[in-house]
Image (cartoon, grey):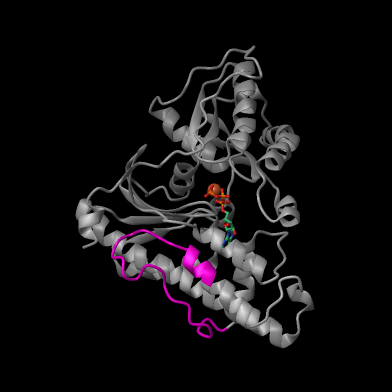
């Protein structure tokens, strides 16, 4: 099988061609980081236009690089949610156009499921059931993957996701936002003392597996104000003393943000092993999983609980087309796909988009476990 994967749920336009044996034939990501830096966030209308501008090039580029045309494909997979509906629509429209032209089956993919399942392309030993911690700009999920398409949500964020906290901290520290905030903080944190600012770990008194990053964001903002750091002065122009206090805050923030992940993962593993003692792996994926500090710290936790960590390479942790193509392959193999759309489908057709789409059911026993 050869599947084209298309991803436009947020601010990256991505496409890839993957073979069912896991071979990646091509992979292209076009990021809107420049737009984000200029406007300080994702504006749906602007993001939609940015996707529309590059989608043809990105898909054509992926096909060219793989030395294929549409008629060589077995199916087209596309993210249908969760995400911004204006943005999702650009990818889905294009996917249906290609699938219609070449009369190919089409697979609608869940973006977060794709973040988790791409680990199975990397680690062939990774069988169901397994656990996954999905950490990105919009999500903070701890799930138990029982089977393909069957997930139990052990924990989620009650406010912000960790990636959002990284991005805001980077902005307030005057870091270069042309890359996303996460890598900038990771880099600066290496210069800082992680114990210099005493941030408190979120939700310590809640013995569950949920997350919260809004309070930590506030703590960071207050620390920045107390050090008189001016975000309008870019870090490259800061005095050495100013630079040091920014690095200290970055390091202390990162340490606390990750301690929160560690604590929740430990508990989630205990819960999950009670549900199914055969679990061997915890997958960590999503943009924040490309962070080396995050990977090292979580590896220790997972090992200490007797499990093994699987973390895709950074390019497969942040948004990409490979994870969509691969998830398409997994579903296609078990017969979950839609028939080819009509070749003359009108451009204003109504599509099945799922901007809000939970991944599995909530773990009902979580509340009593938390007592
Ligand atoms: P979602 O998957 O929730 O829809 P998204 O698709 O926008 O969000 P991803 O590409 O999966 O996002 O992740 C982007 C997030 O990952 C951003 O918040 C970014 O700052 C963060 N990130 C990327 N690299 C790193 C890093 N090295 N350290 C920390 N955070 C990082
Ligand atoms: Fe994502």
Q: Is residue 120 above or below residue 76?
A: below
Determine whether, in the image, residue 367 is placed left or right of residue 250. left
Q: Position of residue 177 (x, y in %)?
A: 70, 62
Identify the residue at image location x=54%, y=41%.
83
**Chief SS of the magenta region:** loop
Q: Looking at the image, which residue is at 49% across and 47% down?
A: 115
Image position of 261 with respect to 256: above or below: above
Residue situated in front as seen by the camera: 157 or 103 = 157
Q: Nearer the viewer, residue 303 or 275?
A: 275
Q: Where does residue 333 sit, x and y in percent of width and height?
A: 41, 29
Q: Can you see residue 212?
A: yes
What segment carries the magenta color?
193-218
Closer to us: 303 or 176: 176
Q: Is residue 175 left or right of residue 294?
A: right
Task: Write the residue at 56% across / 59% down.
Answer: 164
Q: Nearer the viewer, residue 128 or 110?
A: 110
In the rendered image, residue 300, in percent from the top left (x then y), is placed at 39, 70
The image position of residue 102, as x and y in percent, is 62, 17
Q: Does the magenta portion include 210?
A: yes
> Position of 300 compared to 111: left or right?
left
Res. 276 in view: no
> In which quadrant of the rendered image does the C terminus lie?
bottom left
Give above or below for 164 relative to 120: below
Q: Is residue 346 left or right of residue 203?
A: right
Q: Looking at this view, name the residue that lies furthest to the right.
A: 237
Q: Is residue 292 above or below residue 57?
A: below
Q: Quadrant of residue 274?
A: bottom left
Q: How many marks?
A: 0
Q: Is residue 279 magenta?
A: no
Q: Residue placed at 43% from the left, 50% from the top? A: 123
């Amino acid at each position: 099988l050869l599947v084209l994967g298309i991803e436009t749920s947020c601010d990256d336009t991505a496409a890839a061609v993957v073979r069912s044996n896991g071979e990646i034939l091509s992979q292209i990501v076009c990021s809107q980081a420049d737009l984000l830096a200029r406007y300080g966030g994702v504006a749906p209308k602007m993001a939609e236009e940015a996707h529309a501008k590059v989608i043809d090039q990105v898909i054509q580029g992926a096909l060219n690089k793989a030395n294929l045309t549409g008629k060589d494909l077995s199916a087209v997979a596309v993210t249908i949610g969760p995400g911004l509906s204006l943005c999702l629509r650009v990818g889905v429209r294009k996917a249906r156009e290609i699938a219609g032209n070449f009369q190919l089956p089409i697979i609608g993919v869940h973006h977060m499921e794709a973040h988790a399942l791409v680990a199975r392309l990397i680690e062939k030993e990774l069988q169901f059931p397994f656990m996954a911690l999905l950490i990105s700009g919009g999500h903070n999920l701890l799930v138990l993957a029982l089977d393909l398409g069957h997930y139990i949500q052990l924990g989620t964020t009650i406010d912000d996701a960790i990636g959002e906290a990284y991005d805001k901290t980077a902005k307030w520290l005057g870091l270069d936002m042309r890359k996303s905030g996460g890598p900038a903080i990771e880099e600066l944190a290496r210069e800082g003392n992680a114990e210099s600012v005493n941030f408190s770990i979120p939700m310590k008194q809640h013995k569950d597996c949920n997350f919260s990053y809004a309070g930590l964001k506030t703590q960071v903002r207050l620390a920045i104000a107390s050090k008189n750091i001016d975000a309008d002065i870019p870090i490259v122009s800061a005095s050495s003393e100013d630079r040091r206090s920014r690095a200290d805050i970055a390091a202390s923030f990162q340490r606390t943000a990750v301690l929160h992940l560690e604590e929740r993962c430990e508990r989630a593993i205990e819960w999950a092993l009670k549900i199914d003692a055969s679990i061997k792996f915890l997958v960590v994926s999503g943009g924040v999983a490309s962070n080396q500090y995050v990977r090292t710290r979580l590896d220790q936790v997972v090992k200490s609980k007797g499990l093994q960590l699987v973390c895709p390479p950074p390019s497969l942790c942040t948004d990409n087309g490979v994870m969509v193509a691969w998830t398409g392959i997994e579903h296609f193999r078990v017969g979950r796909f839609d028939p080819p759309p009509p070749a003359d489908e009108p451009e204003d057709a109504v599509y099945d988009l799922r901007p809000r789409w939970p991944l599995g059911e909530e773990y009902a026993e979580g509340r009593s476990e938390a007592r």
